[in-house]
Every structure is written in C-alpha cells, then in structure tokens.
Image (cartoon, rainbow, N blue to C red):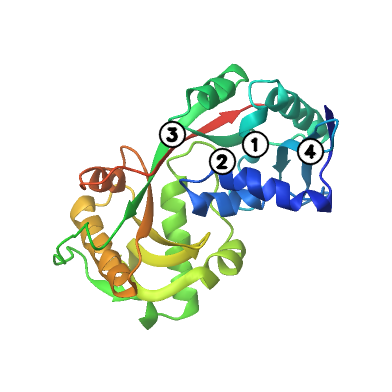
Amino acid sequence: MLIRSFQSGDDAAVAGLVAAGYEGDPGLGEMVRGLYGPDREPPAWRRCLVAESPGGAVLGVAAAQASQHHPGSVPVGVLVGPASRRRGVGSALLVAVREAIEGFVPPPLWSTVDSRDPAGVGFAAARGFRPLLRYGVWRLDPATVRLPLAESPVPLTPLTALDSDAVLDALAALLAWGQETAPGWKPTPREVIRAETLPRLLPAGGVVAVEGGAPVGVAALAEFGGHLTALCDVHNGQAGAEPLLAALLARLLAAAGELGRPVDVEAVLGTPLGTVLDALPTEPVSLRDAVQAEV
C-alpha cells in the first residue's frame, strides 16, 4: 500500500467514498467532500493523502485543513472503502495526516463518526478522539408527517421581507446558537455565511422570530447535496423554546409540502429542537457523534 498526496485524478474515487460514507446524510456529505482535494498552503492550508493499492486503486483518503466554519478546531476526515476496512488502511492514513500537519500547530482536531457503527466509534476512541455531542438528521415527508400551524409565541417576519444584511444577521445568529453547544468552537465568519449559505436559501417558508429587537428563532429552507434542508433553531435559553420551534417547523414542513419534497432537519440530541423532532412519528435517518482530539 502506498500513501501519497491527493491528485486531480482521484476526484471520482474520493467522491464515491464520500457518497458511501454519508449515504444517510447527503447534506453533510456535500460539505465533507470539500475537505478532500489538493494540498494548500497557509493561511487556508490543507493536507490530503490517499491510500493506493499496488494496482493503483484508491483504498481510502484522509485530510485536515484550516476551517472557516469552525475556527476553534481543525476538521479531519478519514474514509476507507468497505472492501478495504479492518486492514490498517484508516490507521495508516490518520497517522500520516497527523504527521503532515504537525508544522501548522493547529487547534484540536474534530471529526464525526456514525453513531450506529461500532467499528467507526471504536476506531475514533482508540485514537484519542473523545465525544462532544450526538446529533441526528430527520427526513420529514410532508405527506406522512404533519404539524399543526399553531400560532407562534413570538411574532414572525418572513425572510423575504428583510434585506440581505438582516437575513445574514439571522443566519449568523442561527449558526452561533448551534455552535455554542460544542466546546471550543467559534462562530462561523459572516463572509463565509454570505458566500456559502445565503446562495442556497429558498424563499419558501423562511421566517425569523424577533423579540426585544434581536432574533430569537430562525427557520429557512436551503438546498444541500440535492436535498431540501431545514435550517431551524432558537436562541439558547429562549423561554417557550419548544412551542416556538414547533411553530417554525410547521411552517417549513408546509412549505416543503407545497414543493412536493421531503425536508431534512438536523438537531443535537437533548436540545429543544432535538426533543421536538424526537417526539415525531419518524426515526432519524442518520445519527453521528462529533468527536475531538489533540494532534
């Protein structure tokens, strides 16, 4: 087995590894795909390595890079094809990528593992990764999951009635609420939100709940990985969080029904949003553990 730097001709093989590894969470898979690519130098550095068989087949890939989305940690990923697992490929790749980034002196590494895959969870734990939180993705089909359009406890304003700066403010608040649940993570920079999230928004169903002149709840539909995705959350500690979340989700589900499409909703387990989703008559299609380790 040869471990070498990523080359442009590896794109198709790596895309296949990502698709297989994130079948239940294509939105996350689309974001993870951006982790793998040619090496870059600081400040936006990246190191990406490929494990190749003697016959030239790509067995696995590993990468780490400076993160725009989570400046407090460095995302690292290791993917190995199903036929090549339990042969030391993943271990060799992780050791190699850790060595490749030593000179950058990065913050802690973070990654995600499939909570339902004991081998993946064990692999991470044995290599020093400790669990931070568990989150799920619920795929809600408007044809089978219905939420009553109850009155919101906080006034709602359609996103379409706001200018782009106000929408950006709402999205920045939404992302910050979720990131506050993960120790060491810092808010996603506004320029990243403007470039990568705003263009994905759909006008249908998007609202912001404002109380005391500040956003306390946000709901919007967006396109990720070819799937309709709900961006939905409330301010941590918000009084009446669950009724507000139910009202926000009901509007998004109604908008998804008008589009004739199911919608994916992601939530950290144990949070108000996770509690609302867990009460619905549907199981999460994906459960993942966010994990962190020192270099």
Quadrant (top left/top right/bottom left/bottom right) for the N terminus: top right
The residue beneath circle 2 is 21
Relative to 148, does residue 285 appear above or below in the rendering?
Answer: above
Label placed on residue 71: none
Mark toward the viewer: 1 or 4: 4
Horizontally, residue 54 falls left or right of residue 250, namely right
Between residue 19 and residue 133, name the one nearer to us.
Answer: 19
Work out whether mark 4 precedes mark 3 in sequence or the reverse, and give the earlier one. Answer: 4
Relative to 117, does residue 140 appear above or below in the rendering?
Answer: below
Q: Position of residue 124 (x, y in %)?
A: 58, 24
Q: Give the alpha-carbon distance from disc 1 to disc 2, as whole Å.
A: 7 Å
Between residue 71 and residue 12, name the one nearer to us.
Answer: 12
The residue beneath circle 1 is 79
Label placed on residue 133: 3
Mark 1 near mark 2, Cβ–Cβ under 8 Å?
yes
Q: Most extreme residue toward the front, as rendered? A: 55
Between residue 36 and residue 54, name the one nearer to us.
Answer: 54
> What amino acid is at disc 3?
Leu
Q: Give the alpha-carbon distance from disc 4 to disc 3, as whole Å.
A: 35 Å
- For image coordinates 72% across by 26% down, the residue present is 89
SS of the residue under disc 4: loop
Residue 10 visible at all: yes
Label 3: how many residues lie within 10 Å, few (<14), some (14-19) or many (20+)?
some
Label placed on residue 57: 4
SS of the residue under disc 2: helix
Work out whether mark 2 precedes mark 4 in sequence or the reverse, and give the earlier one. Answer: 2
SS of the residue under disc 1: strand
Mark toward the viewer: 3 or 2: 2
Q: Give the alpha-carbon distance from disc 2 to disc 4, as whole Å.
A: 18 Å
